[in-house]
Image (cartoon, rainbow, N blue to C red):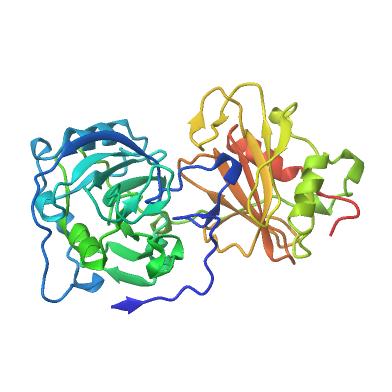
Amino acid sequence: MKKTIIIAVLSTLLAACGVPAETTDQPDTGTAAAAESTTSTTTPATTTSTTEAPPSAQDLEPGWVGPQLLQSDVPRVLAQQWEAAENRSWCSALYPANTADLGAGAEIRSANFGGGWGVAWDLPDGPGRLPTGEYCADCGRGAYGVAGTGGLAWGDEAERWPTTAEMSDGSKVGFGFEGDASPDSGAPLLAYLLVKDEGCNYNVWSFLGEQHLLDLLGQLRMVQGLQGTPTQWQSEIPAPDPVALGDAPWDQPALPLSVVPSVAEDEWAEAGSPESCPMLYFADLGDAGGAAIRNATNAGEMLAAWDLGGGPGHNGDGTPCDDCGRGVIGLGTFQGSSYSAPVAYTWTDGSEARLRTGPNSYGVEAFVRVAGFSCDYWLWSHLGDEHLLYLMSQLRRVENKP
């Protein structure tokens, strides 16, 4: 069993991709903690199977390469969730072959994962999660489940967990206690499963222990008619050469502090005015001109968002909207980022920008690393790639700030 110890885990990351979360607009993070709806169907009651020696992650076989399940053999709720998911074209549905072996009296229901799909099983009793998201010792709610999250997988997500393994087909799995909690916290074991030729990061969780999680993982199968197109992980796609953008915009004359809204200045102060990051602000908002700035908390960092009266944005729960205009753009710091996407843009001072690709709650995103400073600047725009590029060109230093 391979053990990978992660020395420092940033709790504000979107779980799979190393991306910070705008916590006042907290999106579905694609973890087992996602909100779950109440639609349910019942699986047969039976006794959970046991083995004399629990298997290890290294023993897992990729059951999804074998015969597929028939749609008639799986609950309709799975098909309903998958058919409604934004990621269905590149994230096939997975379902356990023998649900009766996983829990006595379990009831399946939908589990909401922004942009993706999910199903959870409730048990009559035992550990689980309350509707508030708190762990419970004997409610049995959401005792285990499977989901295909909405962001495109990079390919190394499983490696952030202490226990990892690679399977014979090239698929990868890693698991540990959700949120890196202690074993006595009541947290479930959460696995990130990267299935070869599937573009999403599957989340598989269980409150019932390691063997139960491994049993669940080992039972997962494809379902006829609920399959997407084979999709490479982002790390498998050759990166184009970065685009040179010339002189860095932050080397232009600094903005006077008087033109910076107090919201941005206050956010900087609340973040502890990090000396590792000079304060940057937009000289112009372009197509987002007239948007109203507000604070958008990201623990220990500066983060601001802007709202328009209409147009694309994201709702308070992080789901994209066509005409709410909420969070249309954003700007913040992100210190110690480990985001590993290829460099997309460079400047003559040695600074560089990486883009977050694929569907997500914040439109298109960039992580700008200014040369000589150990932090990134997180920018997003719901107004498209060209607008995001324009925003990067408008980043300026602020007078009298680090």
Residue at horizontal 91%, vertical 41%? 258
In this picture, residue 201 sits left or right of residue 62: right
Vertical placement of residue 112 versus 16, above or below: above
Name the spot of residue 376 as percent of width and height, x first: 66, 58
Of residues 15 and 138, the one nearer the viewer is 138
Residue at horizontal 22%, vertical 64%? 214
Q: Quadrant of the C terminus?
A: bottom right
Residue at horizontal 68%, vertical 45%? 331
Name the spot of residue 56 as percent of width and height, x first: 22, 73
Name the spot of residue 378 as percent of width and height, x first: 64, 50
In this picture, residue 207 sits left or right of residue 401: left
Vertical placement of residue 313 versus 205, above or below: above
Rendering quarter of residue 194? bottom left
Instruction: Report how many numbered discs are placed on residues in the image.
Output: 0
Name the spot of residue 150 as percent of width and height, x first: 40, 43
In this picture, residue 281 sits left or right of residue 151: right
Of residues 400 and 315, the one nearer the viewer is 315
Rendering quarter of residue 228? top left
Q: Is residue 202 visible?
A: no
Residue at horizontal 79%, vertical 64%? 275
Q: Quadrant of the N terminus?
A: bottom left
